[in-house]
Image: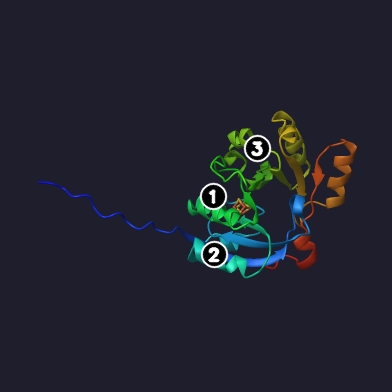
């Protein structure tokens, strides 16, 4: 029996589960203060003790990449951050970031650092949140990601206490992270006094950047800000 070739199937556009798309001020990292559209993907395989986006663990709506692009472009804003949850937990995140870059946006990715970032479009600035002991998810850090770092990438440590700080200092030095990326030390909101962290960094002459969460200073912990 001859089996004829089946007709070429039309490509199926990725469907991505989205919690929210909103315009705000970038609160973190090297573009802090810049108006930015946030695309928050639903779902995360981690459960950090200090998570401030647990509302993104479930729910959400499936949208295609073109639908997401339409929503983003309605804000007429160049900077776009793909965040979560853990965006890389959905394979469609890669297609979304490519499409945003192709459309001329300056794209950054906020990722836990627990999933492989190698396949992320090279035009995307990757912000890895390396998990400290107090997060409860330190064992999930994928240290091979640090070999993938390139100029412009950022590695963030969210710190709850002095033990987290000491661990972060040692880890940043062990992997020589500052040579390849910007290192950010961020106090966990409501848990570590930012002034105390600043004093520790000054005492140790750390060449890293103290980061405050500007959006929370402006608006507290309101979702969608
Ligand atoms: S990785 Fe991020 S979204 Fe996931 S639990 Fe940790 S803080 Fe929350």
Q: Which residue is mark 1?
A: 88
Q: Which image quadrant for residue 103?
A: bottom right
Q: Which of the two residues, 25 or 113, is positioned nearer the viewer here?
A: 25
Residue 139 shows in this picture:
yes
Q: Which residue is mark 2?
A: 68
Outermost residue on the top side: it is: 174
Q: CA distance from mark 1 to mark 2?
A: 16 Å
Residue 45 shows in this picture:
no
* Mark closest to the chain's N terminus, 1 or 2: 2
Q: Which of the two residues, 128 or 92, is positioned nearer the viewer here?
A: 92
Q: Secondary structure at mark 2?
A: helix
* Mark closest to the chain's N terminus, 1 or 3: 1
Query: Considering only vertical position in the picture, is 148 above or below 69?
Result: above
Task: Please state, as top left, top right, bottom left or bottom right, where the C terminus lies in the image.
Answer: bottom right
The percent coordinates of residue 168 (x first, y second) are 73, 38
Outermost residue on the left side: it is: 1
The percent coordinates of residue 215 (x first, y second) are 75, 62
Q: Secondary structure at mark 3?
A: loop
Q: What residue is drawn where x is 79% and y is 42%?
A: 162
Q: Which of the two residues, 59 or 123, is positioned nearer the viewer here?
A: 123
Q: Which residue is mark 3?
A: 149
Q: Circles 1 and 3: CB distance less than 8 Å?
A: no
Q: Which image quadrant for residue 35?
A: bottom right
* Mark closest to the chain's N terminus, 2 or 3: 2
């Amino acid at each position: 029996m001859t089996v004829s070739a089946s007709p070429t199937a039309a490509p199926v556009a990725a469907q991505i589960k989205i919690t929210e798309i909103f315009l705000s001020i970038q609160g973190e990292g090297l573009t802090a203060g810049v108006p930015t559209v946030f695309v928050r993907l639903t779902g995360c395989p981690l459960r950090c003790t200090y998570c401030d986006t647990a509302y993104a663990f479930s729910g959400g709506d499936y949208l295609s990449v073109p639908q997401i692009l339409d929503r983003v472009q309605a804000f007429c804003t160049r900077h776009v951050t793909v965040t979560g949850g853990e965006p890389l937990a959905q394979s469609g995140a890669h297609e979304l970031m490519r499409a945003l870059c192709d459309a001329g946006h300056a794209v950054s990715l906020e990722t836990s650092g627990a999933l492989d970032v190698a396949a992320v479009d090279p035009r995307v600035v990757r912000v890895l949140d390396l998990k400290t002991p107090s997060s409860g998810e330190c064992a999930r850090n994928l240290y091979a990601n640090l070999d993938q770092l390139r100029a412009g990438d950022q590695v963030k440590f969210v710190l709850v206490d002095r033990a987290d700080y000491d661990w972060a200092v040692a880890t940043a030095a062990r992997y020589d992270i500052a040579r390849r990326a910007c290192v950010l030390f961020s106090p966990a909101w409501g848990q570590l006094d930012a002034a105390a962290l600043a004093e520790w960094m000054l005492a140790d002459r750390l060449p890293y950047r103290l980061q405050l969460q500007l959006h929370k200073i402006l608006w507290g912990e309101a979702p969608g800000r």
